[in-house]
Amino acid sequence: MTIKEFYAAVGGSYDDAVQRMMSEKFILRFLGKFAEAGDYAAAVEAVRAEDWAAIFSHTHNLKGVCLNLELGKLARSAGALCDAVRGGAPTGDIPAMAKQMEEDYALVTAKIKDLLASQE
């Protein structure tokens, strides 16, 4: 799998990622560290606990990382959940938004594994 194919598979922007990171080497480096960040797992746990402030904090961080890596689809789903709890009172269907974020995250992490395995 190429990096271009990875971005096409996850709904991201290869061109924007290369422009931001300045090389495919840096993209691979940061994608390799993506799953190590704890905000996704913490956001999922916060959804289970209905901890709106924690959901906001962790999804906001996740959205930022995704925007920096040009992982558009996951950035949008994390951002939707973040916006739904902004201000402390939930709006919208939080479980459905969380499910979408979980699906997008699962796709991204699976494709990262595929990408990294193909680079070895």
Image (cartoon, grey):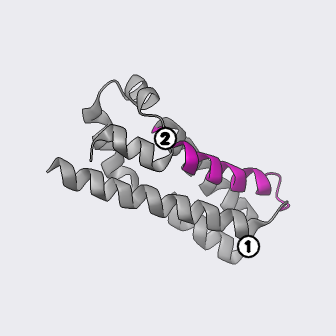
Answer whether residue 25 is magenta in the image.
no
Q: For the residue marked with disc 2, what is the amino acid?
A: Gly
**Part of the protein shown in magenta:** 69-90
Residue 79 picture location, percent across and down: 67, 48
Residue 86 appears anywhere in the view: yes
Q: Secondary structure at mark 1?
A: loop
Label number found at residue 12: 2
Distance (Cα) linking label 1 and label 2? 29 Å
> Residue at image x 29%, y 27%?
23
Quick check: 90 left or right of 103? right
Residue 102 picture location, percent across and down: 56, 65
The image quarter in which residue 72 lies:
top right
Quick check: 87 left or right of 102? right
Which of pointers 1 and 2 indicates the residue nearer the eye? Answer: 2
Residue that carries the numbered disc 1 in the rendered image: 50
Answer whether residue 83 is magenta in the image.
yes
Q: Residues within 10 Å of mark 1 (few under 14, many from 20)?
A: few
Give the vertical position of 36 relative to 19 (above or below).
below
Residue 85 picture location, percent across and down: 78, 57
